[in-house]
């Protein structure tokens, strides 16, 4: 067999193997992003120009998150936040709108205590999405209802729902994204 014929066979095989290797790496990266971000992965893909652009955005979020000083809470601080949450829930009976506003402030305070920046709401969502992608929709929903209640346009049922959604985000932050206190109580 001549060298030209051998090269005509080997080069396409090498190219095909390289393409398969690249596709495999991309598939594994996509799967890792889906697992890490949960529902936030699809939400980001839906809002982006392309899947590749969305995956770049999610990778950028991961890099930013890695630079943050996210820390677990000491037990005494966690207990104080738990008491504060219980106070907000009890307040709901007499002053539901105030309770929802307090729950929003409490979740924001907890974010800050854990080391998340709390300046821009949109940036909060991006930063939280890296470790809390599965509970982030709760935070979005609760926040939307909180904004409605600012104009006294939320129903009592919506306010109750906001408290439930805030609690899901609160528990995720309080317990480092792990087991909920309500699941163990």
Image: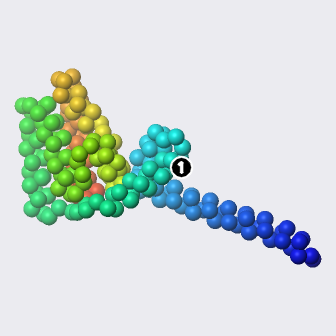
> In the visual, does 124 lie left or right of 17?
left
Q: Nearer the viewer, residue 182 or 134?
A: 134
Reply above or below: 67 against 107: below
| Residue positioned 53% across, 46% down in the render | 51
Reply above or below: 103 against 30: above
From this viewpoint, is residue 176 visible?
Answer: yes
> In the visual, does 141 lie left or right of 8?
left
Q: Position of residue 178 (x, y in %)?
A: 28, 59
Q: For the residue labelled by badge 1, is the local secondary structure a helix, a strand or a loop? A: helix
| Residue positioned 24% across, 51% down in the render | 117
Assess disc 1: are there few (<14), some (14-19) or many (≥20) residues with their C-alpha within 10 Å of its C-alpha: few
Quarter of the image where one finds residue 15: bottom right
On-image quarter of the C terminus: bottom left
On-image quarter of the N terminus: bottom right
Q: How is this picture coloured? A: rainbow
Q: Position of residue 52 (x, y in %)?
A: 53, 49
From this viewpoint, is residue 180 visible?
Answer: no
Looking at the image, how many numbered discs can be counted on the residues? 1
Quarter of the image where one finds residue 76: bottom left
> In the visual, does 150 lie left or right of 29?
left
Q: Nearer the viewer, residue 60 or 46?
A: 60
| Residue positioned 92% across, 76% down in the render | 2
> In the visual, does 108 lie left or right of 136?
left
| Residue positioned 29% across, 47% down in the render | 124
Q: Nearer the viewer, residue 44 or 68?
A: 68
Q: Position of residue 119 (x, y in %)?
A: 23, 45
Query: Residue beneath label 1, please?
Result: 52
Q: Position of residue 75 (x, y in %)?
A: 13, 63
């Amino acid at each position: 067999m001549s060298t030209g014929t051998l090269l005509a066979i080997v080069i396409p095989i090498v190219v095909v193997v390289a393409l398969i290797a690249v596709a495999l790496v991309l598939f594994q990266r996509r799967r890792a992003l889906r697992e890490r971000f949960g529902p936030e992965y699809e939400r980001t893909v839906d809002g982006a120009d392309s899947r590749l652009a969305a995956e770049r955005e999610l990778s950028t979020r991961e890099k930013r998150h890695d630079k943050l000083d996210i820390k677990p809470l000491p037990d005494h601080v966690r207990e104080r936040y738990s008491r504060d949450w219980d106070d907000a829930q009890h307040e709901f009976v007499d002053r539901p709108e105030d309770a929802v506003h307090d729950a929003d402030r409490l979740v924001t305070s907890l974010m800050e205590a854990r080391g998340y920046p709390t300046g821009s709401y949109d940036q909060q969502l991006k930063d939280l999405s890296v470790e809390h992608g599965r509970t982030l929709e709760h935070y979005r929903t609760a926040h939307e209802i909180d904004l409605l209640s600012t104009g006294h346009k939320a129903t009592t049922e919506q306010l109750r729902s906001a408290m439930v959604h805030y609690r899901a985000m609160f528990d995720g932050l309080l317990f480092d994204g792990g087991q909920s206190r309500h699941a163990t109580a």
